Image (spheres, rainbow, N blue to C red):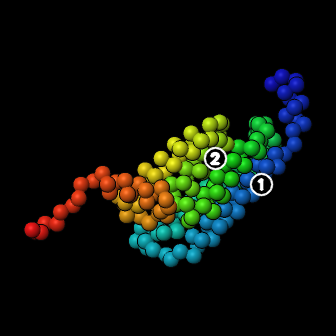
Amino acid sequence: MSEPQAHASARRRPDWAALVIAAGLGLLGVIVAWDASRLGTGGSYARIGPQTIPYVIAIGLGGLAVWTAIEAWRGDFPERDRQEFAPVAWIVGGLLAQLVLIRFVGFSLATGLLFAMTARGLGKVRLPLALLVGVLLSAAVWYVFARLLQLNLPAGPPERLLLDLLAMLSPPRTVAGAS
């Protein structure tokens, strides 16, 4: 290690953001262990029951918390890039818009708007094109989930238009045995 690097690492302070992450990991491990302790005992024959895997996960989270805290206290994490606020705002705004609009405009428009705003946040500049692509992809997803898998997704004007178009394109069904 060269002299300037040695001085730089000796002067580094604890990484407070990483210490917060370590505390969050530790808290999550405690919550998982507490929840596992409330599960009923089972598997008395093999001594492996429904508590086993959650306890393993809790131990793993605790180990990660300790490791992260040690590395953070030493200042061993690499310097992070400066956080850009605008992309985060575009994506969070898209999520909020979808949350508010999905009941009123339907799945395709709300999710298409989310797609467009996320694309804009990740660097895509042509918002109208991203919106068109998002609505078309969302309409296809809506059709697969709502019609083929019979799941209840909110339907708005685009979904009703899609169903009307498909009804016009499909041949009329005949009932067997009708004269």
- How much space separates mark 2 and mark 1, taking CA atoms? 30 Å
> Label 1 crowding class (10 Å Cα cut-off): few <14, some 14-19, many 20+?
some
Compare residues 8 and 112 and report the one nearer the observer: 112
> Where the C terminus falls, by quadrant?
bottom left
Q: Can residue 73 be seen in this view?
A: no
What x and y, as percent, mark residue 172? Answer: 23, 58
> Where the N terminus falls, by quadrant?
top right
Q: Which labelled disc corresponds to residue 117?
A: 2
Give the mark, 2 or 1, whose residue is nearer the N terminus.
1
Q: Which residue is drawn at 67% across and 65% down?
A: 30
Q: Which residue is drawn at 76% across and 45% down?
A: 85
What x and y, as percent, mark residue 110? Answer: 57, 56
- Amino acid type indicated by mark 1: Val
Compare residues 4 and 140 and report the one nearer the observer: 140
Label 1 sits on residue: 20
Q: On the picture, is 37 further left or further right than 165? A: right
Q: Which residue is drawn at 75% across and 57% down?
A: 23
Q: On the picture, is 115 further left or further right than 1? A: left
> Label 2 crowding class (10 Å Cα cut-off): few <14, some 14-19, many 20+?
many
The outermost residue toward the top is 2
